[in-house]
Amino acid sequence: MNEPVQNIDAVHERDLEKLLADMGKLEEFKQGRVLCKFCGDRITTANIYSILPESGSINFICQKPECIAQLFEHMDGKRPQ
Ligand SMILES: [Zn+2]
């Protein structure tokens, strides 16, 4: 699973929970310990934009325009040569 999960808006909250459970992140998420990779804000079902599995860890990105912009810059930098 190397592709980011996009269009979280389209994912039902229950499906998001399943996704988080599959990633072993559901408890952390429910406890408010999941933070945006870029700005460090707490990720909730209301502000989650994307989930980015990366080198053995899972990163979360919030919906702030600057974080989304950083995500795309980050993705560009990660493109295989
Ligand atoms: Zn953010």
Image (cartoon, rainbow, N blue to C red):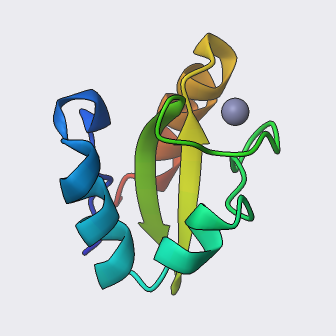
Q: Specify the quadrant that holds the N terminus.
A: bottom left
**For the image shown, how many numbered marks are present on the structure?**
0
* Depth order, front residue of 31/47: 31
Residue at 33%, 53% (x, y): give it. Answer: 4
Q: Residue 62: x percent and y percent?
A: 58, 34
Is 38 placed left or right of 79 in the picture? right
Q: Specify the quadrant that holds the C terminus.
A: bottom left
Residue at 67%, 17% (x, y): give it. Answer: 66
Quadrant position of residue 69: top right
Is 29 placed left or right of 37 in the picture? left
* Depth order, front residue of 57/28: 28
Q: Residue 29: x percent and y percent?
A: 58, 64
Q: Residue 47: x percent and y percent?
A: 54, 29
Is 32 placed left or right of 61 in the picture? right
Residue at 27%, 40% (x, y): give it. Answer: 6
Write down which quadrant ligand 1 falls in: top right
- Compared to residue 24, the image places residue 19 above or below, namely above
Quadrant position of residue 33: bottom right
Q: Name, please, the residue furthest toward the right.
A: 40
* Depth order, front residue of 14/33: 14
* Depth order, front residue of 2/14: 14
